[in-house]
Image (cartoon, grey):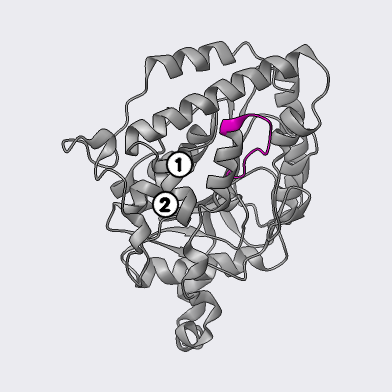
């Protein structure tokens, strides 16, 4: 679910990195959270605490490896109550899984803001879309109003989680078309901290898991939000730590660094990188098949993230098919798992993730 991508020698990687870099347009719109006059009257009312100072319903994280213990850092940074923190770990190596589990449980100790911490263990890497769907399925299973899907290498600055929660609670209660939200993350990391709602799940559906192992799944979902009746909001002044840097700066994911920039000279890394690149190439082809030839190029020219906001629709939302695969009988929730992707996932179960 890493929306930043690779400046590697691989041509498709270069193209996708550019797409993701510009795939967030909401920053061009007025920022409601930065305009105190919109919220001050409500903030000062007697019902403010009752209505807005609610625990975050859900934070979900899906990961397959964590050599720098980022997950522990994230858990320690939670400084505002969260009802459910759901962690999904997918790796063929049980020793890596146990190490992540142990460190996460240790990080939770003493943090009274984590009301309930739960783990789901898989013996393979399920991919980025599956990780986003882990959040959406939890919202459905627990009947929650909203939740935050995070990369494992995110961390909160003090007070930011409360700020996010207040803004989301406000718009959840006062804007019936609010469906999806974003933080101040930029430069390819927009979907690394994604606010999703129950109404988003009902209208736009689950992420398409044919985008495996990663990349283009956020592009696909953005197009689908374009075509829905919902709109997105970006909550600025919500800075986050992303990997080793402030989230307002250019971000290179740990996976990209490991596979392309500073790869260990091992056979396992070569196999993993080859599988990854083949998956990304196929995902790009699938994206254009689903939404129209050169759709990715059009989005690259203008920027992306759901451009439908309270202010209207930008012209660059035009140009994609109105229905998946240009089939009028398919609504925007439609996708069916393809056999070639299932075969790739099966082969990936034999690849060691370090």
The prevailing secondary structure element of the residues shown in magenta is loop
Which stretch is magenta? Answer: 3-12
For label 2, the SS is loop
The image position of residue 341, as x and y in percent, is 44, 19
Q: Quick one: quadrant of the C terminus?
A: top right
Q: Which residue is mark 1?
A: 138
Position of 41 with respect to 230 (left or right) is right
Q: Residue furthest left?
A: 329
- Residue drawn 75% across and 43% down? 70
The image position of residue 190, as x and y in percent, is 56, 53
Count of residue discs: 2
Let me know if residue 295 is in the magenta part.
no
Using the rendered view, name the quadrant where residue 258 is placed.
top right
- Residue drawn 42% across and 51% down? 144
Does residue 139 appear in the picture of this structure?
A: no
Using the rendered view, name the quadrant where residue 331 is placed.
top left
Q: Quick one: quadrant of the N terminus?
A: top right
The image position of residue 103, as x and y in percent, is 78, 37
Position of 31 with respect to 312 (left or right) is right
Does residue 43 appear in the picture of this structure?
A: yes
- Residue drawn 38% across and 34% down? 288
- Marks 1,2: beta carbons within 8 A: yes
Position of 43 with respect to 88 (left or right) is left
The numbered mark, 1 or 2, whose residue comes first in the sequence reads 1
For label 1, the SS is helix
Front in this rendered view, residue 205 or 279 = 279
Q: Which residue is mark 2?
A: 144
Q: CA distance from mark 1 to mark 2?
A: 8 Å
Density class for disc 2 (Cα within 10 Å; few <14, some 14-19, many ≥20) is some
- Give the label on residue 43, or none: none
Front in this rendered view, residue 33 or 11 = 11
Question: Is 26 above or below relative to 116?
Answer: below
């Amino acid at each position: 679910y890493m929306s930043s991508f690779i400046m590697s020698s691989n041509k498709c990687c270069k193209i996708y990195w550019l797409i993701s870099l510009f795939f967030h347009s909401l920053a061009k719109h007025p920022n409601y959270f930065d305009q105190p006059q919109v919220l001050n009257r409500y903030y000062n009312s007697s019902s403010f605490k009752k209505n807005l100072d609610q625990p975050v319903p859900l934070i979900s994280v899906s990961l397959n490896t964590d050599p720098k213990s980022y997950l522990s850092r994230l858990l320690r940074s939670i400084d505002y109550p969260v009802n459910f923190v759901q962690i999904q770990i997918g790796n063929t190596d049980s020793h890596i899984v146990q190490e992540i589990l142990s460190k996460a449980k240790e990080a939770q100790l003493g943090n009274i803001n984590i009301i309930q911490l739960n783990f789901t263990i898989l013996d393979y890497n399920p991919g980025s879309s599956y990780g986003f769907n882990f959040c959406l399925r939890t919202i459905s299973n627990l009947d929650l109003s909203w939740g935050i899907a995070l990369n494992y290498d995110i961390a909160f600055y003090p007070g930011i989680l409360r700020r996010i929660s207040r803004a989301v609670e406000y718009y959840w209660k006062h804007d019936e078309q609010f469906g999806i939200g974003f933080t101040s993350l930029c430069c390819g990391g927009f979907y690394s901290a994604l606010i999703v709602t129950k109404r988003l799940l009902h209208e736009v559906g689950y992420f398409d898991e044919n985008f495996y192992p990663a990349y283009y799944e956020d592009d696909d979902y953005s197009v689908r939000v374009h075509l829905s009746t919902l709109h997105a909001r970006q909550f600025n002044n919500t800075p986050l730590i992303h990997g080793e840097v402030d989230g307002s700066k250019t971000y290179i994911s740990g996976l990209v660094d490991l596979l392309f920039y500073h790869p260990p000279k091992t056979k396992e890394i070569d196999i993993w990188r080859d599988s990854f690149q083949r998956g990304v190439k196929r995902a790009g082809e699938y994206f254009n098949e689903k939404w129209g030839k050169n759709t990715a190029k059009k989005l690259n020219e203008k920027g992306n993230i759901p451009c439908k906001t309270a202010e209207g629709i930008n012209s660059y939302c035009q140009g994609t098919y109105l229905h998946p695969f240009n089939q009028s009988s398919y609504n925007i929730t439609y996708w069916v798992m393809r056999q070639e992707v299932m075969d790739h996932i099966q082969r990936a179960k034999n690849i060691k993730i370090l």
